[in-house]
Each structure stands twice: as C-alpha cells, then as structure tokens.
Image (spheres, rainbow, N blue to C red):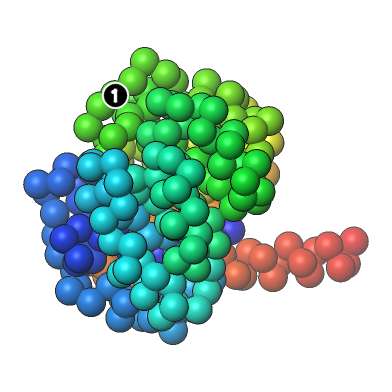
Amino acid sequence: MLVIPAIDLKDGKCVRLIQGRMQDETVYSNDPEAVARRWVDAGAEMLHVVDLDAAVQGTPCHQTQIAAIVRAAGVPVQVGGGMRNVGAVAAGLASGAQRVIIGTGAIENPAFVREACRAFPGRIAVGIDARQGWVAIQGWTRTTETLAVDLARQLEDVGVCALIFTDIQRDGMQTGPNIEETRKLAASVHIPVIASGGVGRLDHIRSLMALEAVGVTGVITGKALYSGEVRFEEALALTRSERSGSTTAAVRA
C-alpha cells in the first residue's frame, strides 16, 4: 500500500482544511515546492496535489505552481481540483502530472469522464467524496443525491485508473478512516481504490492495509503528517515491511 502525502493549495500556500471548510484552514508552508521535496526526500513514491481554489471556482488556479511542484518532486504526482473539461485535464497532464483527478465532473457530466479516459488512457482518476454516504461536489459545498457506491459502480467500465475515496466528515479530524465505507466501495468494483480522510496515527494506516485484499492500494494523508502525529518514515516502514513480508511468503510458497 502506498502512503501518499497530500499537498493542498489555497492562495498559493500549502494548507489543510477541516472537513473541507475553506474558512477552517491551517497554513503549513508558503513554499509548496519545498514541501514536495521534503516528502520525496523522506521516501514518498507519489504525491497528491489538490487546487482547493479551483475545486470551488471550477477552473484551475495554480497551474504554474503545480508544474513547479511536479518538477521539484521528481516522482509521480496526481493532481485534482477544477477538472471540469478536457482542456483542464490536458493542462493538468501538461504540467507533468502522472494523472488527473476528476471529481465534480463525474456527477455533472459523465460523458466528459468517458471522453477524458479515451483521450488519456490510464491517466484519469475519479475522486469520490462522500458525506454520510452521499457524493459531495463543487469543493464539497454541495451534497448530491448519488450514493458513493453507486457512482463507483457507474465508473466500472469507463476506463478510470483509480478511485480516490474521501469521507468528508473524517477529513482533517484525525479520528480514523471510515473503514467500513471504504471496504464497501472497494469491494463493489474492480478499480483500485485510494483511501483518504481521517488518518491520525499509524494504527489507522495499519487498519487500511487490511483492505488491500478488496482493492485498496493506497492511503492519502495530510494533517497527521504536518502536525507530526504520524511520522512519514514510520508509515513508510510499516507498509514496506508488509510488502517485504508478502514477497518473502510468495517466494517460500
């Protein structure tokens, strides 16, 4: 399982929000590029970058900065926020990102997701952000009448390379991920799932590792890393020890 540090951009700064509320921000750095280098130097194999302003406004706001982060990182980066049309997706990929995350567009314009997957095969992920099981869009400012699991099933044959599932009520709270909802969503599809929201200690990552059997391949964490509640090196050691153990067992078998 990959442990993926989050870099959320708002007004050019690296911030973390509480349950997605734009007014409840904590600024962790005025230099997101340095933050990216910090996580990569610590061993990160992928970064998760979200343009929070774009998620609300609907158009990319930090394109130049995201391109600089991608260059500074030197590892695969997935980028989300404001990806509402193929032009925005193309610009995101042109920044050097390995893949782009579509969120709101998956609800408002399903044909757009299919078009993007055809145009950029293997490089389109969908973010499914849920509040009490219901998908929320437009920077989490509007809750829809679509269940997260139903949206996941609708995407099964579209060509999406990954689903990023966030429980909004857990996001930034460090109270633990929603294991059961994550399990239910991952088990309902054959698309790899990355869990997000709620990580506050190593045990939370360990609990998600138990979901690898149903297709959970990664976990995104932000506030726990920035606050120091979780040391990235320890999280990496935990997941890598599991990988090593699985490889050894396979060789012995």
Residue 98 percent coordinates (x, y): 55, 62
Instruction: Look at 59% across and 25% down and name the residue there.
Output: 153
Instruction: Look at 33% across and 25% down and name the residue there.
Output: 132
Vertical position of residue 127 compared to residue 25: above or below: above
Residue 245 percent coordinates (x, y): 70, 67
Taking the image as shown, residue 156 lies to the left or right of residue 222, namely: right
Can you identify the residue that label 1 sits on? 143
Taking the image as shown, residue 229 lies to the left or right of residue 239, namely: left
Count of marks, rendered view: 1
Instruction: Look at 30% across and 69% down and name the residue there.
Output: 65
Q: Quadrant of the C terminus?
A: bottom right
Vertical position of residue 246 compared to residue 152: above or below: below
Vertical position of residue 185 compared to residue 89: above or below: above
Instruction: Look at 51% across and 27% down and name the residue there.
Output: 110
Residue 63 percent coordinates (x, y): 33, 62
Q: Nearer the viewer, residue 205 or 40?
A: 40
Residue lying farthest to the front in this orientation: 87
Residue lying farthest to the right in this orientation: 253
Residue lying farthest to the bottom in this orientation: 41
- Under circle 1, the secondary element is strand
Residue 23 percent coordinates (x, y): 9, 47
Quarter where residue 203 is shown: bottom left
Taking the image as shown, residue 157 lies to the left or right of residue 112, namely: right
Can residue 70 be spotted in the picture? Answer: yes
Quarter where residue 66 is shown: bottom left
Q: Nearer the viewer, residue 146 or 133?
A: 146
Residue lying farthest to the left in this orientation: 23
Vertical position of residue 44 compared to residue 26: above or below: below
